[in-house]
Amino acid sequence: MQRPLMERNLARALSALVLSLILAACGPVDLGAITRQAVGAPSPTTAVGVTDGAQQDAVKLVIQRANEAQANAFNRGDPTLMRDTATDAFYTEVVQTNRDLATAGVRQIALVATEFTSVSVDGANAKATTLETWRSTYTDGSTDEQTARNDYALVFQSGAWKIQSDDQPGDAMQPAPQTSTDTGTPAAAAVTSSTSTNWSGYSATGGTFTSVTGSWIVPTVASTTAGADATWVGIGGIDTRDLIQAGTQATVSGGEVVYEAWIEMLPASSKPVSLTVNPGDSVTVSITQKSALDWTISMKNSTTAGRYNITVQYSSSNSSAEWVQEAPSAGRGTVPLDDFGALKLSGASAVRDGKTLDLGALGAKAITMVNGARQALAVPSVIGADGASFAVTRTQTPSTSSGGTPRRRRG
């Protein structure tokens, strides 16, 4: 996030250096009151005599104040608190992120700790990397505390630094479950199963994957439990940073359920697409590599005859294929898993090393979703006799905090 920054004339630069000493010696200081007094500062490119250290301190202050502003904006329901520290485009993005958090059942967010690992300033542009720990409190009383890397880009506008973007590559570091069987975890319907805090279904590895396909009936989700679920097929993501995926999602908020189709290419956030889906619809999704960077995503609603097709550019490791029912993520944490009942997925296949194979032939491994107490939330069945179908069943276990590292879906 961002807010008005320590400005760039010489007096401001010196005050920034003094400020760090004041903070160390005197404890908490109203940084907002201090920075609000600065006006008419020149751009960093003309601030002769301003040291690199002062500029870096100014960047740090903006990021710190911006994060505090996001928490206050969310907790008070006043998004304008974030305007001073962000460019117009980034302000719009963060406002939407807070809306998504509220929709996902988050009641309060808090910044627990911030560690700066690097800060650099180049004229009117700056970059910074932090490790931030945030705590989310949900409407059911559960909490979720996570630490993630944030890569910030800032620009100097109208005498103040503004945050232009905030990428969280750490969210893509562990999009997949642990691949080894976890002893002591709840027994799954499948013969062997790894565990995940946000995935359930099947994954296949052991070759180069260039296509994945799956069909499912969009589950009818109960409107009584706030949360969300996302059904998708994808390539990559098992112990890698890359993942290209597409599917459907249900979000429950205020007693209403919203269904949508979406695509996503990590580390970018997901985006909804123009394919209408409703509970009970039969949906088929395919993702196919056409060239080194060109991928075709095809989605069909067989119930309504609706279709969506797009070609995107994406660099993939081609290292795995997945058929997943997920508890999505929004902003600062994992969304509670809704009550989707049972998901039935069929026609599951992938092209590995040039051959089209079903789940059985691929040797796909089952994934059980668990909560923070290691209790099963969503359990996959064994692969059907056809080698290409399975079900995922939602248990009655409540979706408590898991403490995992989910993706940052803005679903």
Image (cartoon, helix red, strand yellow):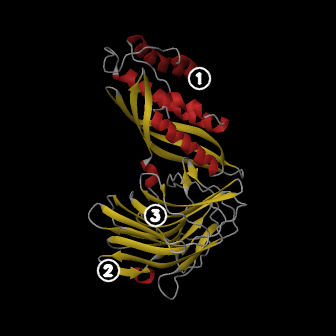
Q: Position of residue 274 (x, y in %)?
A: 48, 59
Label 3 to label 1, Cα distance in Å? Answer: 47 Å
Do the CB atoms of the residues marked 1 and 2 lie less than 8 Å apart? no
Q: At 63% across and 67% down in the image, what residue appears?
A: 377
Give the residue at the far top of this rendering: 11
Q: Nearer the viewer, mark 1 or mark 2?
A: 2
Task: Give residue 162's mark.
Answer: none
Is residue 279 placed above or below 256 in the rendered structure?
below
**Of label 1 and label 2, which has the lower sequence position?**
1
Q: Disc 1 marks which amino acid?
A: Pro
The 10 Å Cα crowd at callout 2, few under 14, some 14 to 19, many 20 or more, is few
Q: Position of residue 21 (x, y in %)?
A: 48, 18
Q: Disc 2 marks which amino acid?
A: Lys
Helix or strand or loop: what does disc 2 sit on? strand
Give the residue at the far left of this rendering: 292
Q: At 40% across and 61% down in the image, what residue appears?
A: 244
Q: Quadrant of the C terminus?
A: bottom right
Give the residue at the far bottom of this rendering: 385
Q: Quadrant of residue 287?
A: bottom left
* Residue identifier under label 1: 28
Label 3 to label 2, Cα distance in Å? Answer: 22 Å
In the picture, measured across the screen, residue 371 lies left or right of residue 322, that is right
Residue 115 visible in the shown view:
no
Q: At 48% across and 32% down in the image, what residue appears?
A: 86
Helix or strand or loop: what does disc 3 sit on? strand
Helix or strand or loop: what does disc 1 sit on? loop
* Residue identifier under label 2: 355
Q: Nearer the viewer, mark 3 or mark 2?
A: 3
Label 1 to label 2, Cα distance in Å? Answer: 63 Å
**Of label 3 and label 2, which has the lower sequence position?**
3
Q: Quadrant of residue 354?
A: bottom left
* Residue identifier under label 3: 246
